[in-house]
Amino acid sequence: MPAVQETIDQVRQIDVDQYKYGFETLIEMDKAPKGLNEDIIRFISAKKDEPEWMLEWRLDAYRRWLTMEEPSWARVEYPQIDFNDIYYYAAPKNQTGPKTIDEVDPELLATYEKLGIPLREQEILAGVQESKVAVDAVFDSISVVTTFKEELAKAGVIFMSISEAIREHPELVRKYLGSVVPVTDNYYATLNSAVFTDGSFVFVPKGVRCPMELSTYFRINEKNTGQFERTLIICEDGAYVSYLEGCTAPQRDENQLHAAVVELVALDDAEIKYSTVQNWYPGDSEGKGGIYNFVTKRGDCRGANSKISWTQVETGSAITWKYPSCILRGDNSRGEFYSIAVSNGRQQIDSGTKMMHLGKNTSSRIISKGISAGRSNNTYRGQVSAHRRATNARNFTQCDSLLIGNNCGAHTVPYIEAKNATAQFEHEATTSKISEDQLFYCMQRGIPEEEAIALIVNGFVKEVIQELPMEFAVEAQKLIGISLEGSVG
Amino acid sequence: MNMQSKRPITAAEQGLVDSFVNRLGSLPGDQTITEIRDGYIEDIKRDGLPTRRIEAWHYTDLRSLLKTVPQDTGDTAGPVEPLVAGSNVLAVAAGQADDAVAADGIQISQYRDALSDGSARSRMAVHGADDVIGRLNGALTRDGFALDIADGVSLEKPLEIQMVQGGGQGHARFPVTIGAGAKGTFVERHVSVSDDSALVSSITDLKVGDNAEIVWVIAQERGLQDTHFGQINIELGAGATLTLFVANSGGELVRQEIHIRARGEGSELILRGVNLLGGQSHTDVTMTLDHLVPNCVSTETFRNVVFDRARGVFQGQIRVAQIAQKTDAQMACNTLLLSDDGEFSSKPELEIFADDVQCAHGATVADIDENHLFYLKSRGIGDKKARAMLVNAFIAEIVEELEDEALIEALEARFEEWLDHHG
């Protein structure tokens, strides 16, 4: 059965030629010379005023990267990337790091305003919004400003750019950086380790529930640059944080590289909720331009009873290569992955998750919706594995895909690996199995099945989506409600 | 940076090359066939056996799993009793096809003749760079049967193609053409008659004509020391119905590939599989199904039971071409993992390019359901018996979909015997 008209209309509204964030900010930039070598890495490290160990870490990563080969297993095609034809560092002149809001170039503030991200705290407070959201704004290679820092510090929460954290909390960064995604984890993660420029650092101490939503907004602006962000979030025992990232870029004819690494660490009883609204420039309808989004995201449920939940709404990028994963190491830990990936034009998405069950009584849930339109290809690639010691591991996976039109493709590549007899894995592609009980509950109250499913999926992500400070929160909400009637499995 | 060239050749790879060298001069084939054989063995020499880095072999790292290759032992295996009593039997024993020329309305010729006169060359193409079974078999095949069933012929008795092996190696190929509207049941059976270790490769090319109705059973019952490489390549004509039943209950290292192309509109494929895995064995069933035309239906259901330290693999890939609208494909892989030392990995893939189709895949891995067990035990059935009943039921559900009583009984008897031995 083909897709319903409503869905087709909704998807058309976010087609590649409807991209709203394609403007460019004209601002004088300070750049490193083009190309990649040890001097560039020294340059970046010096710009950030980093300690010696950090530089060594970067150089070590770079040397290892030189011996590695680009992965080719994903279902994406792109011309060879010339890693020497990229600027690895670009920052607005007169700004080498975050400043107080009054010192920030008004041009930059205007940019974020245009994107729907208010950076002035009083403006946020004056707004109708009830809840506050702290924002770390990253512009090309540097963090421009981080809001509500003082208020968060009062609660004991550290929220700052990673460059600042390396200087101010070196012991914490050193302890956790690279502990979830090892330096040599994969080609792009290793590249990131060598040249990462900015990103956010969050530390929530024992027993603290972070008093507000945290978010980072990534903006690529300069031509021929790559953005290499690094985010590190640590929740100590019993702590909780909800974090959101958003990203956009100007419309350009050439492709730009974005290779990020995100590491989450949840200790005993901690919970991290990580949401992404990815809206990088997708290229035009002929596939010209757009961001190559090669991202490594991984959460480590290191402590018992910890929980990590990934939610992603993916509509941007020419190529997406991204598998937010959970290492369920602690006993009774839980991992979740909710994803909505919409591809239009000539976009290529190869995304999914990995749930690695190592501890006892660990559980995970994967809900993925892929929607392909235009001439795009949308692949779900996921792995669920139960280690020999992972007694009573449980997983439920549901991935649905929907095709709109006859020139696109939808693919599903699940890897299911059980090495423990008490593991219970269910992988379903049918929409009727979301959770029989919940569905029955809704349906017996007269809600049609399709709406009930939307309601249930919506329920998973609503909490986060409603808090989005961004203009496209509305869009995200709409996407989640998209009917998957006519899904092909 | 060619890493491949620095790779040391493994004992098994050397063994395969040696097998080829030792057979030089005795393998049938004209000039062209000989060149094709040479090419394949060169490929194996150059690329080696696949590792898990080759996606098609992700869970079966042949380079480390295949330790040694048995050399010929002067095997004197002969035909065995058929699976279903009263079947016509065509046997390839110790790699040599018997001299049958016709049975029950079927044209039969020996594949060695097609090799000798060069007409087999069109049969020897491989699927791609990762088709090791195709290369291995192409290089070393000595014999097999070519079957031709005329249009409209209806076979009264099942036809069993046996590949019987003691120790050493056997490599055979079976091109089978089923005429339009023909009907019949075929059993492709792989058996061992000694405890000596054997390495066997077998490729069947099954072309099912328009509106034909065929049941094809692959029963692999090799010995605990044996390596079995099976491949079946199927083309389905318009309106054809094929019930393909794949049963693995033997072998130490097994890879059974199933490649199906639905080429004619309105065809139906019913694929069922039972994998009984025990001991230290490694069994891999890999399927690719191409829906190339509109309005075809296919269902694929696999039931796996894992005991001991066995490892099982199921890779299923359904590809729906852009024009194959109204395709209905449903794939499921259910596994009972009954041992903490056992493993099962599955990869049920969908690749869809048409927007008006129904494709689903499901995969489950679990132990026996405690509720089911409780139900039986509360009725006074002991734990061991209750478990056996549930395992039996799990398999029987699939087997009983076959409509042929004699065939169901024969398969169930075989499975029960296996389970008694392992359960």
Image (spheres, rainbow, N blue to C red):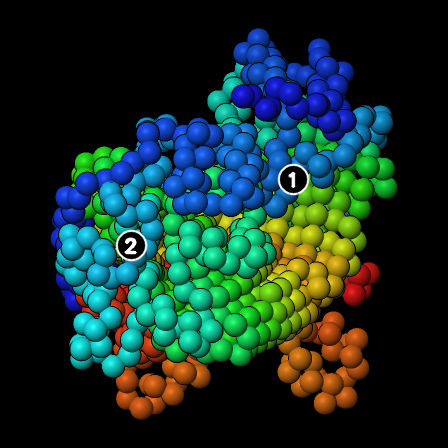
Real-space Cα separation, disc 2 to disc 1, in angstroms: 50 Å
For the question of whether residue B37 can be seen, the reply is no
Q: Nearer the viewer, mark 2 or mark 1?
A: 2
Quarter of the image for the C terminus of chain A: give it.
bottom left
Q: Is residue B98 left or right of residue B104?
A: right
Chain of the residue displaying label 1: B
Q: Amino acid at mark 1?
A: Asp
2 and 1 marks on the same chain: no
Question: Residue A332 appears in which quarter of the rendering?
Answer: bottom right
| Circle 1 SS class | loop
Q: Nearer the viewer, residue A56 or B253?
A: A56
- Residue A445 place in picture, x, y as percent: 31, 91
Give the labeled residue for mark 2: A144
Question: Residue A183 appears in which quarter of the rendering?
Answer: top right
Residue at image x 16%, y 47%? A25
- Residue A83 place in picture, x, y as percent: 38, 30
For the question of whether residue A97 can be seen, the reply is yes
Quarter of the image for the N terminus of chain A: give it.
bottom left
Question: Residue A100 appears in which quarter of the rendering?
Answer: bottom left
Q: Nearer the viewer, residue A353 or B153?
A: A353
Residue at image x 64%, y 30%? B49
State the mark number for residue B108: none
Residue at image x 74%, y 85%? B377
Give the labeled residue for mark 1: B61
Q: Amino acid at mark 2?
A: Val
- Mark 2 closeness class: few <14, some 14–19, many ≥20 residues within 10 Å: many
